[in-house]
Amino acid sequence: MKLWGGRFQKETDKIMNSFNSSISFDYRLYEEDIVGSMAHAKMLCSIGILNEQELEAIINGLNEILEGIKNGEVELSEAAEDIHMNVETLLTAKIGEVGKKLHTGRSRNDQVALDLRMYLKKEVLNLKKLIVKLEKVIFTLGRENMHTIMPGYTHLQKAQPINFCHHLLAYAEMFKRDYERLTDCYKRMDYMPLGSGALATTTYNLDRYMVMELLGFSDVTLNSLDGVSDRDFAIELNSCLSLIAMHLSRFSEEIILWCTTEFGYIELDDAYSTGSSIMPQKKNPDVAELVRGKCGRVYGNLITLLTMMKGLPLAYNKDMQEDKEAIFDSVDNVKICLEIFANMLATIKVNKDRMRKSAGEGFTNATDGADYLVKKGMPFRDAHEVMGKLVFYSIAKDKSLEELTIEEFKSFSSIFDEDIYDALDLSNCVERRRVIGGPSTSSLRIQLDELDAFIKKAE
Ligand code: ARG
């Protein structure tokens, strides 16, 4: 017999039962559902709807069910549809008639809106911790590589010399923003919807603020139709997750490039690489590839959620049951990606010589040559032209700029002097970029200090 069976004459069709049921995925909400029910029961007691003995029986019963589900003793049933009705059915089976009073002044519509908010709030905090863990790895690796010169790229063509620390700290900034976005998203999730009822609240004089306080929310939802019928908080979280996944995916792409023989900038630890079943020499960057790949499903879930909501009239519609698989999948995958990516990054071997050598190829110091001429009075556009010609000449001679003789330099402009070699020295090129945000030691110190402060504050 269904909890809602009174109005019905026939059994539910078998396929309808499994089609309609969400227990296979909303079982995850069991703790939030039970804790939420306890708060609801306490509030019902405080306004005289339950007496003390009834409350005690309900709380004890719910506690036992919670334990039972946790240690796998309690079986959840498809026929009971979802986690909410499973818990209620189990409670009544356990404590008898009193159990039937729990749902007074409540609907599954406000119940699921509550459970999902509670569950996602908890996961936002877990996600934030994982971002901090990744930031710590970036900090350590960055600090070890403040003088590891590498080429910076645009269009994946060598552009200007930077160092590995500078490159890594770019990602640190992205993940800092991701962290802030989660903080912000949490704020809008932190409204307690119970008391909205099915859509129009109830005629009982519910104390919503008491439930809010018991469950640690910062406020209550202000309109009952809105409280039960928006899922923007899940969608917002999924968009934050999409950005995290996108950042991880770009970083992964670089990891994949860097450990090719063509680049050879890093080597992955054996624990985070895989071999080939046929090619004995292979060491593949599967972690980074999977992280890059999983980004697609996180975007997909965002579109699922947005599309699910776009045509729904107020208030609750069953379409919204589809929210859970999508957001759970995004949360699960971004969590595992953050964790494994941090572990992989923490164990890479950096081939500093290879990075340095690569920065010395491809004329990454050509801009510095132009800046040298500018500082001696030549307009930048002319200096650009002189250096362009010098690069063209050097390619033909198969030399780097610093391998040219002073006579060769002078044949392009009389301004050149012996100090051009100092200007073209890669370490000097990096070190002289002292502007805030740049790769010089002094600029990196500021960036590292900020990152350190961020980590300390977050912990
Ligand atoms: N399992 C449902 C969900 O996830 C709970 C709410 C059901 N409400 C209803 N009126 N059928 O959305």
Image (cartoon, helix red, strand yellow):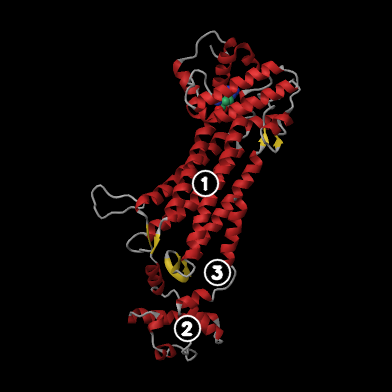
Q: Image point 68% across, 36% down: which residue?
A: 217
Residue 367, visible in the rendered structure: no
Residue for point 38% across, 85% down: 404
Crowding near the residue tagged with mark 1, few <14, some 14–19, many ≥20 C-alpha atoms within 10 Å: many
- Expressed as whole percent of the image width and height from the top left, the position of residue 172 reads 53, 57
Q: Which mark is residue 30?
A: none
Q: Where does residue 37 sit, x and y in percent of width and height?
A: 63, 25
Q: Are marks 3 and 2 in contact (CB under 8 Å)?
A: no
Quadrant housing residue 46: top right
Amino acid found under the numbered disc labelled 1: Ser
Answer with the quarter of the image where residue 356 lies.
bottom left
Q: Earlier in the sequence, mark 1 or mark 3?
A: 1
Q: Residue at x 44, y 19 (%)?
A: 15
Q: Which residue is the site of mark 1?
A: 242
The residue tagged 2 is: 422
In the image, what residue occupies the spot 32% across and 49% down? 274
Q: Is residue 315 above or below residue 335?
A: above
171 left or right of 268 in image: right
Q: Quadrant of ligand 1?
A: top right
348 relative to 201 in the view: left or right: left
Q: Mark 3 sits on what residue?
A: 438
Q: Residues within 10 Å of mark 3 (few under 14, many from 20)?
A: some
The type of residue carrying mark 2 is Asp
Q: Secondary structure at mark 2?
A: helix
* Position of residue 278 measured from the top left corner of the image (x, y, whole percent): 23, 49
